[in-house]
Amino acid sequence: MRRLHADAKSSRRVGSIAATALAIVLAAAPGPASAQVTEDPQQDAIASARTFFSQFGVAADVQDRLISDYLSGEQWDASSSTSRPTSTRIFDDGVYDYTLRTYPDGSINVVRVERPTSSTGPNEVSTQGIGGCTRVVSGGQDHRNGCKVDFWWGLVSLSFYSSFTYITPGFDRIDSVWGASWSIGGACSTDRNYFGINKKVESSTGPARARLEVQAQMCGVAYTTTFFLQLTVGAGGAKYTYG
C-alpha cells in the first residue's frame, strides 16, 4: 500500500527502492520455512505501480522495462507535460473525467478530474462524487466547488482539491485550493516545496494559477527531483499541467 502524505510540509520516509528491488520482486527464490517474513516497502511500491499499469492495459514486459528504467534514474516520457503522447483516450465513469495518455516509451499517465452534474437553471446546486464536487450557477458566474484532480504515472501520484469560478463577462478566478497529497515511490524522503494560488484572478496577461510542487530525494541511484501539478483557470475553462 502506498504511503500518502497529507497537506502539511513534512519530510517522511516512504521506502528505499534500490535497483536490485526489481530482481527481488520478479525472481525471488523461496527461503527456508523457518525464515522470518517481514513487510518490504520496496515490493509495495513496485506492486502499486504494476496495479496502476495493469488497470490501464500496459503489457507486462513493458512494465518490467519501465520500472527497471525508473529505478536506474531514467525519466519516463509520461512524467512531463511537454512530452508528446502517441495516443490520448478520454472517458468518464460517471464520477470522474479521465484523460489517459500513452507515450513512445510505453509509459502512461492519467489525469482524473472530479466532475459535477450539470445544473439546469440559475441558482441551482448539483452534487456528485466522493469529494462533494458541486456546481452553482448564478447570473454570469459559474462556481465549481471542492473538485478534486488526480495525476498518476505509475510510481508517482499528486492530487489536490480546488474551487474556482468562471465569470461571463469578466475574468475567471481560483477561489481556494486545499487537501494536497502525494505518493512518490522510490523516494527516501519528500518535501512540499510549494502549495497555493500563484495568481488568483485571470488577467490580460494570462490565466489564474494554482500549483502543488513536491521535492523528492530518490534512493538507489541517489538524486533529487521535483514533481508538480498545476491548475490554470481562464477563458471559461480549467486545465491541468504536470511534470
Image: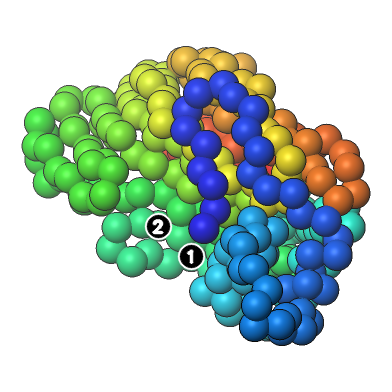
Q: Residue at x 73, y 44 (%)?
A: 187
Q: Residue furthest front?
A: 34
Residue 149 is situated, as x and y percent measured from the top left of the image, at 45, 44
- The amino acid pointed to by label 1 is Ile
Q: Is residue 241 above or below residue 211?
A: below
CB under 8 Å between discs 2 and 1:
yes
Q: On the rendered structure, is 138 left or right of 34?
A: left
Q: Residue at x 66, y 22 (%)?
A: 193
Which one is earlier in the sequence, the residue at label 2 or at label 1? 1
User: Where residue 191 is drawn, which disc sits there?
Assistant: none
The residue that label 1 is drawn on is 90
* Numbered disc 1: secondary structure: strand
Residue 22 is situated, as x and y percent measured from the top left of the image, at 79, 69
Q: Nearer the viewer, residue 38 or 52?
A: 38
Where, by quadrant of the figure, is residue 124 drawn? top left
- The amino acid pointed to by label 2 is Asp
Q: On the rendered structure, is 228 left or right of 122?
A: right
Mark 1, residues whose alpha carbon is within 10 Å: few (<14), some, or many (≥20)?
few
Q: Which residue is drawn at 78% across and 36% down?
A: 217
* Numbered disc 2: secondary structure: strand
Q: Which of 79 and 69 is in front in this view?
A: 69
Query: Residue 233: in sight, yes or no?
Result: no
Where, by quadrant of the figure, is residue 60 drawn? bottom right
Query: Residue 157: in sight, yes or no?
Result: yes
Where, by quadrant of the figure, is residue 218 drawn? top right
Q: Residue at x 12, y 37 (%)?
A: 125
Inter-mark Cα distance, 2 to 1: 7 Å
The residue that label 2 is drawn on is 97
